[in-house]
Structures are given as structure tokens and as C-alpha cells.
Amino acid sequence: MSGHNKWSKIKRAKGAADAKRSKQYSKILKEVAVAVRESGPDPDSNPRLRLLVQNARGCNMPKDTLMRAINKASDKDAAVLQEITFECHANHGIALFIECLSDNNMRTVANVRAIMNKFGGTLETNGSLNFLFTRKGVFVIPRKPDMDIEELEMNLIDAGLEEMEADDEYLTLYTAYEDFGSMVKALEDMKIECESAELQRIPNTTRSIDEESMRKVLKVINMLEEDDDVTNVFHDMEIPDDFEEDE
């Protein structure tokens, strides 16, 4: 699991700058629409929706906003969103895996292609870069003063815990893709609420490039993340702990 510690720091720091609250809300609301379409509007019988409700609470989304999205998605005339992925190379060989939710494939493809062309990147054939990443469950839990970290770690091993990272504010748990549901259930049974719980694509190895090049690649990533259809952008670039991104 080399590189995970840096990855979690990158994702969390970027999560604060990354999408501003409106983007974070937009991502959850789109995923709610897909979850409701798949398995109905009742969180008790729809595990994917139940998790999204929890994530919405974690980012302080107003309850009314969430309920409107659930009700809207239940309407048979609601727009159907599709999950689309892109695999790209940015400058200096940095691999990007882009996840989208869209009601218009042609628009999404055109937007992603335009951004990559503008910055000298290339769209690759789907499946050609997938092997560079491993899909993992990543759970971020606020750390409470009375938590016994060692006991919690032991209790979660049976649910598929592969690694736990701890800092002063958060615990970050990692599971294999196939153990994601088991960890969700285990945390629910223990009445532990996550700030976020999601599937991420963790790079198997990371690539180190100079700071100027790193800033150029991050500019591409930021442009992609600003697109309304893009929900996640994963990369294999190594970012030093002391790196400060441009405002």
C-alpha cells in the first residue's frame, strides 16, 4: 500500500480546495439520482443511497436539498444519468482516470477532449491505463478523544480493513473493493459515522516530476474537476507533503 499516506493527504486537502461546497453537493446529488434509479428512494433498502445520505450529512448538506433530489430522482421523467470514465495522459506521462456522471455523453466527451487538447494531454483507449490504479474503499472518520484506535483497528479487520492511517483529526480506513459493503455495515453496526465513504482509484506507484510541471498537471486536473459532469479525477503524480498548491 505504498504511497497511500500521501494520497489520503492529497485527497483530503484537495477535497477542501477541490470542489468548493457547491461542487461537492453536485457530485452527491448526481450519485443520489443514480442510486434511486437503481434501487429505489428508501435508504433502508438501498445501501448505496444510505451511504450517500451519510456522506451528505458529512459535508453538511441541508436535509431539504437532499430530500428534493431523492424525490426528483423518483420521477419517471427525470433525466437518466450515465457513468462514463476516461483514461488520459497529461504532460510528463502523468496518468489520469476521470469519472463522470452525465445525461449527455457527447457533451461530456467533447468537454473532456477540449480540456486535454488545450493542455497537451491525450485521451487513451479505455482499459489502457486502468492497471495503474487499484480500486479501494476509503473511509474518513472524525477522530474522537475517547476512541481506542488499536481496539477499533482489531474490530474492523474482519470487515476487510487493510490499512488504517491516523492523524490528530481523522482516521482513514482502506479496504479492498470487494470489502466496501462489509466495512459500511460494520461501521453502521458500531454506530460510527463517516465524514466520507467512497470508492477511490489508488495509484499502484507514483511518478515524481519537478514542481513547475506538477503545477501544470494540477491546472489540468482543476479544469477537469470544474466541469459539471466530472465527479472524480485520480492521478499517479507524487505530491510532496510540503507542496502548496496555487490559490
Image: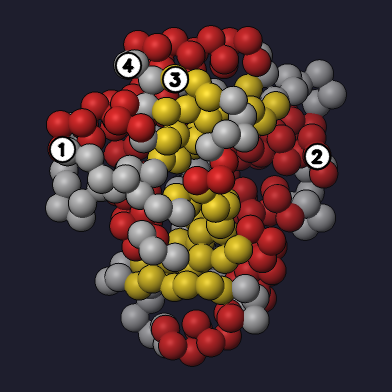
For the residues labelled 3 and 1, say whether their Cβ atoms are less than 8 Å apart: no
Query: In the displayed structure, does residue 114 sit left or right of residue 119?
Result: right
Q: What amino acid type is highlighted by mark number 2? A: Glu
Q: Is residue 50 left or right of residue 113?
A: right
Can residue 25 be seen here? no
| Badge 2: residue crowd in 10 Å (few <14, some 14–19, many ≥20) | few
| Quarter of the image where the C terminus is located | top left
Q: Earlier in the sequence, mark 2 or mark 1?
A: 2
Mark linked to residue 211: 1
Cα distance in 3D space between marks 4 and 2: 37 Å
Q: Nearer the viewer, residue 207 or 211?
A: 207
* Residue 182, image x, y percentages: 69, 69
Kindly tell me whether residue 4 is visible in this rendering. Answer: yes
Label 3 amino acid? Thr
Identify whether 182 is placed above or below 3: below
- What is the CA distance from the residue labelled 3 to the residue labelled 1? 21 Å
Cα distance, mark 3 to mark 4?
9 Å
- Above or below: residue 99 compared with residue 239: above
Q: Residues within 10 Å of mark 4 (few under 14, many from 20)?
A: some
Real-space CA distance between mark 2 and mark 1, rounded to the nearest whole angstrom: 43 Å
Q: Residues within 10 Å of mark 1 (few under 14, many from 20)?
A: few
Mark 4 and mark 2 lie on one chain; the one further toward the N terminus is: 2
Query: What residue did someone put label 2 on?
Result: 38
Between 129 and 9, the residue placed more toward the observer is 129
Q: Secondary structure at mark 3?
A: strand
Q: Find disc 3 in the rendering and name its residue.
A: 122
Circle 2 or circle 1, nearest the eye? 1
Mark 2 or mark 3, earlier in chain: 2
